[in-house]
Every structure is written in structure tokens, then in C-alpha cells.
């Protein structure tokens, strides 16, 4: 099955290519015949592999003859060999002896006449002719479409591979698996050949999901969206030919199914026996997996005939049989067959499915029932099943599935027949399920429809629900207004009032307004005392109060309150309460209390727990973002990248996506991946267009940091000034970080002389720093500790405007060392060394500081910081390599040296291993879920650490250190 192979890379087959090469020309095959037979369904990439392996074998010095069998039976004996010889002769240009041998063998075929010596003599003469062509070199015969091989070629293969010819020969052949049915003569040949030790039969499996996405992206020319990648994977089943066809349709904007694919699959289905044809149609109409008993009820065939039919469909590679039932190998078959049945035939199939499921003993299959009754044209019978399926999904915390079933119920309710339908209840359930599974925009739309259906003034409960959905969508300002309206509503019951106060406390906490959050939390707890069954309100309010107290008053007492809130949530068993308690506890530990290691553990454990509860896409993503930030601060950037990749698989939206994008952006800014960081910041700004005060300062702080690495100090200044103007947060930690960025921008402007220093901006920043210092004086000790670190940076940056004081930078480095934050500590050492060198004093100390900073920056992968350290060291003629007392450079490569890769981070080792496999930066990025630009940064850093200039040199070091 051909395709535009020249435009698509060979994906996911590197290991197989190496296995085949080794089997044919490796040490084990030296001096004897060997063969590899590749079997697989049509389109799985057999022909492409033959070509790729043939090219590799030629590079190894082998003589490669390539031919294809024809679907014409035995009418053309030895056709593939003749074709291979003619192709080889046409390609020859320099080896006269070889060309003469080829033409001699071709002439022998032309002169061959029937004689008494028979086929045996012919085979011997062919063997001698091939021996002359090889001229002592390995000879490889590559045959495609071996399922159509003629009888003479089969005999020749058996003769040569049995070692009867005086020839070292290797055979590589491809066989279309679905063609080897019944008494096909090649089945017996392969059975005989399997007994030979040097013969291997390898089944070529479809591509996995990651390789499918990589191949499709290569054809389309860009990374696919999550929805497009999922669709290609589901429709193709990993078949490379199908993947490429679907990807071209996607690239060219074509809708529907191409005629090429339609005809290919129809031909395969039409080739089936009658009952097997019916089996495939039935499975295509069913919900996979289709159990055997259910298929029997639908088709009403005798058991023996059903088994024979199913076996034929499996053998033709259209179905896959497993213990749990039958599946289509390619979902595209269902799309193709959907247009081959009359409407009455389709509805009849679905009706038989629904009747069989209804009559089945035991638990009803509600989701399947709803599906089949709907397609059978029975909405009144489908609606109760859809509602029951949604309720069952919610019971198992499957909110995405519940949302799908509630949405289906809403559609069915448009024509309920004799049933009485409460559309208000359907809308309420559908909106809540959409909210829980992360479809925040859809939840708000459904809520507006609900409000319009009810009419009149919105109720207190509706205000609370709208506020929850707005907060989850990242529209914090509007959410706060809705909570205030709820508290003022005339119909607000004590329970609703407690719920509104508790949720408002949680929102204020996220906005960094800890004093306000504590006040609302106390109000909510007081209200909840008089309300039975108010566990949710107690958990939310306790978490907010504990966080507020820990930041502003007593860390130990606040932390104890939050741990109790988590225990209460677990006992109550409400998924969202458990998620909220985990989130606030992890935020407190990794933020104000600076207990980073425990905070990361709590965040990751919480993410696993909420995923079990069906909230992985929403709360789980936010917990993983907290873990990423904690890992960033302690310097475990490679591990943080892995957590980013895991979180991205949730495909979050709204505020959850904002949290993750900001966390990933911190890594990108640190790595110096300016393009990726800019994309994430633009995406966050777009998501926050509807209001998201909670994220304003982190967003603008990162934008300022990115602008400084780009040398755009005026842009950095504007970002900080905007943050100081727009935010109402009293979170002294994020404010102090923002002020540091502002003073650093002014210091960088002064140092680089790219723009003038703004005295007004400096004065305002110093005033804010003083205000933060006064405000933090009354905060809890851990909070003051973190703020003091940023204030130390602020004081040192101010000194850069007038000569830079090395002692202030020494204080800053010590502060961050004490908190186990390696990045700001390394930055402080760079500035301390810079100040010492500017004063031409303590040069040796400056050199030591630069080496310490360089070691940390390299270990992190912080490319911009590393470059600045290297630039300063170069100007000052300071060596960044530490030297032993004997004068040798520490880490110099000797026979007794340690692992040459010791200087690389864990992520850099992963990247280097894939570089050594021959993957491009784009391919590595797709494998590791990282942008191509970030991979380039890693590769550059690897080259620098290994002191190499090319990928080949780096690969050699990787292979040298992993032999055996």
C-alpha cells in the first residue's frame, strides 16, 4: 500500500530496523544464510521498511537485490528475482565484472529450456550466478508482497535458505498477513522456514499513540491540537498509511473520508465471507468491545457459524478479538460502513442491540442502551437510559462521561414523546458536570439557559453557582461580585449564606487578600454552626482560615487547622472538598511556609487522589502546577518538566490552564526559551481577558523577567509598574518578588545603558519595598523569612545604581542559601563577583563565586544566567574550571575519570540519549512533550558541558559511556 513516503519520516521503527540489520548482517549471521520475514496488515509500513533497511544494508557494503511479487499466480516463474536483477543491472555504473555476472544470469533465464535435469539444476545455476554477482560480498535479496510469490521462487528460497547453494545469502521479505488464509501455500513455507535457527518471522505492529502523533505532526507540518491528535489516533488504529492519509486531509483542510481510504477498506470488507461480512457490520454498529454473547443475540447465527465468521474477520485484520469482546482494528471501518447500510438496516441493528441489552440478566448497560435506542429512533426509550448513565458516571466520579450523558439527555429531551421531562433539572446537572470536568465556558452557557428558563430575579443559589463557575474560568473579579450579590439576596438561606461566605473566603485567599479571607472564613464557620450537614462549608472556611492564620499570625496553628480540614474532607467524602483541602495545604507549604519538599510531596499525592475522584483535569492540574513551582524553587527543573508533561495530558482550561501555563513559563524563562515563554504569557493574558486578578502579579513578574533576558528593560519596567497599579493583593511574597524585578530592571538599564534609569520608578519601588517590609513585620516568621530574601535582593539591586555593594550581594546569597533556593543564590553570587571585580579587589574570591554560580546554573540548565556568568568570567579572564592542588583541572577526562556525563542534568541525559538515536530536535520534543526550542536550549547546553561542537561528537560520548 503506497503513500507519499518521501514526505513523511520513518517513525517508531528505529529499534526494528536495527534488529533486522543485525539478524541479516550481524555477527550471528556471518558466513551463513539468514532471513527475516516481516508480516503485517496492509498499510502498516512493510514496503517503507524494506526500502529503509535496504539502504542501510547497502551502506554496510552488501549487494542488495530488490524485487516484488505479482498477483498473477505462477504465470511468471521467478518474476521477483528477474525484476531484482534488471533493477540492479540498471543501477550499475562502475563494477564491470558485477554487471557482466548480472547479464549472464539474465541471459541464462532467457535461454532456459525444459530439460531432464529439471528444476534442481536451474536452482543450482541461479545459486552460482548469484555467487558471481556477490563477488565475496554479503548478498541480500529483498522481496515485497511475498503473499503472491510464485511456486518457483518459493522453491528457490527453500533451496538457498537451507544452505544447499554455495552462497552466503540473506533474505528480507514482507508478507501481507490478511492474505495468508486457509491453505495458502506460503503458510507451509513459513512453517518450514521457522524451524531454521537463522530465520525470523516478525509481526509488524501498528504504531503506538506517541508515534502516531509524531508521524501526523510531521505530515501536517505542525504540532497537532490535542483534539486532532486524539481523532487521528482513534480513526487510524496506528496504521501508518491511514495516519498519513488522515494527516494530509487535516493539512489540506479536507473534511470527511478520502475516497482512497474508503475504497481500500470497502475492498477488504467485500473480500470477507458472507457471515464474516455481517459480523464486521454488527461490530461497527456496536459499542466496543462487543461481547461474544451480545454479538450472537444481534446476528442470531448458529454458534459454530458465528465463531467461523468472527475468526475470518480477525484473520483478515479487520477485527481484533480479546477476552472482553471484539473491536474494529481501525475505527475508520465504522465510518466507511455507516454509509453502506440503508437507514432501516442501521436502525434495525441498533434496535436488536438495545433489545438484547435490555433482556440481558444482571446490571443494565445504561450508556449502551441510551446509544442504541437513540440510533434506533426511540428517543423516549433512550432518555431514561442517558439519565441513568449520567448518574452512574457521577457516582464513580467520571465527570467527563457524566457531562457527555447529560448533554445527550438534553438533546433527547427536545423530543421526549410521552415522557414528562424536567428540563430545569437536566440543565442543573449538565452545568455542574461540565464545571467538574473542566468545561467552564460550557457550564456558564448552560447556567444562562437555566436562568432564562426560570425567569425572574436570579436566586441566591444561582448567584453562588455562577460565581463558582466564573472563578474556575479565571474571571475572579466577576466571581467576587456574584458572591457579594448572593450574600445580599433576599432569598439567601442560612445554608446558602454559609456557602457563599466560605467560597468567597476561598476566592479571596487565591487573590492573596489573606486578611479579608480570614474574616470571611470566620463568618462562614459561625454560620455553619447552625446548619446541619455543612461539611463542605466547614472544609472550605477552615482551609481559608488556616492559610490566613499561618501567613499572618501563627504558622503552626494555621497548618494544624488545614490538616484537620483535609481529614474532615476525607471523612465527608465530597471530591471537591478533598481537592480544595489538598490544594490549600500544598500552596501553604510551598509558598508562605517555604517547606518545599513536603509541599511538593503533598501536591503530587493530592493530584493522584483527586484524579481518582474524577477531578484530575481541574484540581489535579492545579496541584501539579504547585508541584512544578516547588520543584523549580528547589532547583529540580528536569523533574519539574516531567510534571509539566503529565499535567498537559489533562488538557486543562480556564484558571486551571492559567496555573499550569504560568508554572511552565517559569521554567522557560529560567531556561532562556524566550519563544516558548512568550507564547505561554500571551495565552495566559488571553485567558485572563475576562478578569483574573489573582494571576496578574505572577503574569507581570514573569513578563518582566522575560523582557530583561531579551534586553528590553523599558518593557520590563512597564510590566512591573502595571502590576503595582492593577493588583489589590496583600500577598507580601509576590509583591516583594515584583518589586525586585522592577529594581533589577532599573539596575540592568543603568548597567547596559540601553535606556535611562527612571528616578520616579526607583523611588516608587523603594517606597513599595519599605511598605512590604513594614507589612511583613507583623506576618508569621516563615513569611517574613521569604520576604526578607527578596528585600535583600532589592537592596542589592539599588546598590547597582551607584557602584554595587558586594557585601549586600553576599547577604542576599546567604539568605537564599538558607532557604534552599539555588537560582537566586547563584544570581546573587554572580552580582557579588561582578561588584568585586568592578572594584578590582579580592579577584580570587570573585573567581570562586563565579565558579560556584556557574556550577549551579549549569546544573539547572539556566542558559541565560550561565551565559552571563561565562561572559563576565571571560572579560575578567577568570577560569570557570576548578583546579586541584596538583594543577589538574577538576573533571578532566582521564582513563580513571568518572562518568563523562556526570555534569549533565537528568533531563539533559534524556535528551542526549535521544540525540544518539539520531532523532531531530523536533522529534525529541514530541517524545518528551517539550517545545522544539527548549530542546535546542538543552542541546546547546549539552555541547557546552561536554565541550563538543557536533551531534556526532556528543553521540559518541553517550555511546562510550553506555557500552555493555
Image (cartoon, rainbow, N blue to C red):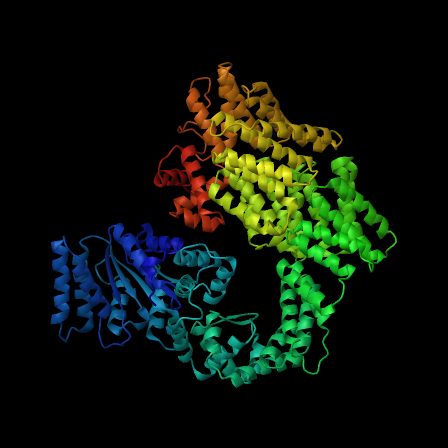
| 83 to 648, vertically: above or below | below
Question: Is residue 141 shown to the viewer in this render?
Answer: yes
Where's the N terminus, which quadrant? Answer: bottom left
The reply to whether residue 818 is visible in this rendering is: no
Instruction: Please tell me whether residue 523 is drawn above or below residue 436 in the rendered image.
Output: above
Residue 174 sits above or below residue 571 on the image = below
Give the residue drawn at x 67%, y 55%: 470
Residue sitting at x 65%, y 79%: 415
Point out residue 387 in the picture as x, y percentages from the top left corner: 68, 72
Q: Where is residue 772 in the image (x, y as percent from the top left)?
A: 69, 31
Instruction: Name the quarter where the C terminus is drawn.
Output: top left
The image shows residue 515 at horizontal and vertical percentages of 76, 40
Image location (x, y in percent) of residue 559:
76, 40
Among the 4 quarters of the image, the one containing residue 508: top right
The residue at the far front in this view is 760
Whether residue 550 sits left or right of residue 366 in the image: it is: right
User: Residue extending furthest top?
Assistant: 841
Q: Which of 392 and 431 is in front in this view?
A: 431
Given residues 383 and 574, the one toward you in this image is: 383
Residue at image point 44% right, 17% down? 886
> In this orientation, which residue lies closer to the viewer: 400 or 570?
400
Amino acid at each position: 500500500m503506497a503513500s507519499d513516503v518521501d514526505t513523511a519520516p520513518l517513525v517508531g521503527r528505529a529499534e526494528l530496523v536495527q534488529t533486522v540489520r543485525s539478524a541479516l548482517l550481524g555477527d550471528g549471521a556471518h558466513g551463513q544464510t539468514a532471513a527475516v520475514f516481516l508480516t503485517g496488515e496492509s498499510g502498516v509500513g512493510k514496503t517503507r521498511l524494506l526500502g529503509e533497511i535496504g539502504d542501510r544494508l547497502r551502506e554496510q557494503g552488501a549487494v542488495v537485490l530488490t524485487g516484488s511479487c505479482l498477483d498473477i499466480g505462477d504465470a511468471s516463474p521467478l518474476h521477483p528475482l528477474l525484476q531484482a536483477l534488471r533493477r540492479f543491472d540498471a543501477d550499475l555504473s562502475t563494477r564491470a565484472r558485477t554487471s557482466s555476472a548480472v547479464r549472464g544470469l539474465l541471459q541464462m533465464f532467457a535461454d532456459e529450456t525444459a530439460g531432464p535435469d529439471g528444476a534442481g539444476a536451474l536452482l543450482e545455476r541461479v545459486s552460482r550466478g548469484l555467487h558471481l554477482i556477490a563477488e565475496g560480498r554479503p548478498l541480500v535479496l529483498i522481496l515485497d508482497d511475498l503473499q503472491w510469490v510464485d511456486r518457483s521462487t518459493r522453491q528457490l528460497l527453500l533451496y538457498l535458505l537451507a544452505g544447499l547453494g554455495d552462497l552466503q545469502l540473506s533474505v528480507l521479505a514482507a508478507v501481507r498477513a490478511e492474505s495468508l488464509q486457509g491453505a495458502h501455500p506460503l503458510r507451509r513455507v513459513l512453517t518450514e522456514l521457522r524451524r531454521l535457527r537463522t530465520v525470523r518471522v516478525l509481526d509488524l505492529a501498528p504504531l503506538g499513540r506517541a508515534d502516531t502523533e509524531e508521524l501526523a505532526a510531521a505530515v501536517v507540518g505542525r504540532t497537532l491540537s490535542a483534539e486532532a491528535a486524539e481523532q487521528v489516533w482513534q480513526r487510524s488504529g496506528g496504521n501508518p498509511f491511514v495516519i498519513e492519509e488522515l494527516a494530509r486531509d487535516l493539512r489540506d483542510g479536507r473534511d470527511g473520508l478520502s475516497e482512497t481510504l474508503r475504497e481500500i477498506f470497502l475492498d477488504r470488507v467485500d473480500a470477507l465471507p458472507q457471515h464474516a461480512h455481517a459480523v464486521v457490520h454488527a461490530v461497527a454498529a456496536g459499542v466496543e468491545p462487543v461481547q461474544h454473547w451480545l454479538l450472537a443475540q444481534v446476528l442470531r447465527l448458529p454458534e459454530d457459524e458465528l465463531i467461523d465468521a468472527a475468526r475470518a474477520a480477525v484473520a483478515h485484520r479487520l477485527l481484533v478479538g480479546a477476552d472482553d469482546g471484539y473491536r474494529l482494528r481501525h475505527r475508520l471501518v465504522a465510518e466507511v460502513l455507516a454509509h453502506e447500510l440503508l437507514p432501516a438496516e442501521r436502525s434495525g441493528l441498533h434496535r436488536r442491540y438495545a433489545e438484547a441489552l435490555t433482556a440481558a440478566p444482571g446490571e443494565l448497560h445504561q450508556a449502551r442502551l441510551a446509544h442504541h435506542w437513540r440510533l434506533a429512533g426511540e428517543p423516549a426509550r433512550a432518555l431514561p437510559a442517558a439519565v441513568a448513565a449520567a448518574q452512574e458516571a457521577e457516582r464513580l466520579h467520571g465527570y467527563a462521561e457524566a457531562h457527555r450523558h447529560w448533554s445527550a439527555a438534553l438533546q433527547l429531551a427536545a423530543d421526549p414523546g410521552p415522557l414528562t421531562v424536567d428540563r430545569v433539572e437536566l440543565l442543573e446537572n449538565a452545568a455542574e458536570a461540565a464545571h467538574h470536568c473542566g468545561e467552564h465556558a460550557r457550564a456558564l452557557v448552560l447556567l444562562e439557559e437555566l436562568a432564562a428558563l426560570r425567569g425572574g430575579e436570579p436566586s441566591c443559589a444561582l448567584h453562588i453557582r455562577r460565581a463558582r463557575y466564573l472563578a474556575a474560568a479565571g474571571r475572579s473579579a466577576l466571581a467576587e461580585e456574584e458572591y457579594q450579590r448572593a450574600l445580599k439576596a433576599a432569598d439567601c438561606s442560612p445554608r446558602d449564606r454559609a456557602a457563599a461566605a466560605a467560597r468567597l473566603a476561598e476566592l479571596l485567599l487565591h487573590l492573596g487578600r489573606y486578611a479579608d479571607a480570614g474574616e470571611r472564613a470566620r463568618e462562614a464557620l459561625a454560620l455553619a454552626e447552625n446548619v446541619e450537614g455543612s461539611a463542605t462549608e466547614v472544609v472550605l472556611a477552615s482551609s481559608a482560615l488556616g492559610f490566613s492564620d499561618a501567613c499572618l499570625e501563627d504558622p503552626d496553628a494555621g497548618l494544624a487547622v488545614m490538616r484537620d480540614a483535609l481529614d474532615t474532607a476525607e471523612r465527608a467524602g465530597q471530591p471537591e472538598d478533598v481537592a480544595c483541602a489538598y490544594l490549600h495545604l500544598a500552596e501553604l507549604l510551598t509558598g508562605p511556609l517555604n517547606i518545599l519538599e513536603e509541599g511538593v510531596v503533598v501536591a503530587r499525592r493530592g493530584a493522584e487522589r483527586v484524579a481518582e475522584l474524577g477531578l484530575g483535569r481541574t484540581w489535579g492540574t492545579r496541584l501539579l502546577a504547585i508541584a512544578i513551582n516547588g520543584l523549580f524553587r528547589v532547583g529540580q527543573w528536569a523533574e519539574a518538566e516531567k510534571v509539566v508533561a503529565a499535567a498537559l495530558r489533562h488538557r486543562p482550561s480556564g484558571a486551571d490552564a492559567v496555573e499550569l501555563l504560568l508554572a511552565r513559563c517559569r521554567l522557560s524563562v529560567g531556561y532562556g526559551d524566550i519563544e516558548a515563554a512568550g507564547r505561554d504569557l500571551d495565552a495566559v493574558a488571553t485567558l485572563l481577558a475576562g478578569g483574573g486578578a489573582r494571576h496578574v502579579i505572577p503574569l507581570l513578574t514573569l513578563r518582566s523577567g522575560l523582557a530583561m533576558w531579551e534586553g528590553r528593560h523599558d518593557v520590563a519596567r512597564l510590566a512591573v509598574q502595571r502590576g503595582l497599579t492593577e493588583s489589590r493583593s496583600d500577598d507580601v511574597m509576590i509583591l516583594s518578588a515584583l518589586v525586585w524585578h522592577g529594581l533589577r530592571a532599573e539596575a540592568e538599564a543603568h548597567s547596559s545603558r540601553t535606556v535611562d534609569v527612571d528616578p520616579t520608578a526607583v523611588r516608587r519601588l523603594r517606597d513599595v519595598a519599605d511598605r512590604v517590609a513594614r507589612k511583613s513585620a507583623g506576618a508569621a516568621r516563615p513569611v517574613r523569612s521569604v520576604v526578607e530574601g527578596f528585600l535583600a535582593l532589592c537592596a542589592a539591586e539599588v546598590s547597582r545604581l551607584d557602584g554595587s555593594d558586594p557585601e549586600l550581594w553576599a547577604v542576599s546569597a546567604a539568605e537564599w542559601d538558607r532557604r534552599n533556593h539555588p537560582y537566586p543564590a547563584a544570581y546573587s553570587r554572580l552580582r557579588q563577583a561582578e561588584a568585586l571585580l568592578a572594584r578590582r579587589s579580592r579577584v580570587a574570591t570573585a573567581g570562586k563565586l563565579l565558579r560556584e554560580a556557574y556550577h549551579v546554573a549549569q546544573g539547572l540548565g539556566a542558559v541565560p544566567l550561565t551565559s552571563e556568568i561565562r561572559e563576565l568570567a571571560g572579560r575578567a579572564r577568570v577560569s570557570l574550571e576548578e583546579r586541584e592542588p596538583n594543577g589538574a583541572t577538576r573533571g578532566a577526562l582521564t582513563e580513571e575519570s568518572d562518568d563523562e556525563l556526570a555534569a549533565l542534568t537528568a533531563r539533559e541525559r534524556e535528551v542526549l540519549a535521544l540525540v544518539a538515536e539520531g532523532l531531530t530536535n523536533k522529534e525529541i520534543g514530541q517524545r518528551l512533550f517539550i517545545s522544539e526550542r527548549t530542546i535546542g536550549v538543552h542541546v546547546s547546553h549539552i555541547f557546552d558541558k561536554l565541550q563538543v561542537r557536533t551531534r556526532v561528537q556528543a553521540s559518541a560520548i553517550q555511546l562510550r559511556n553506555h557500552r555493555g
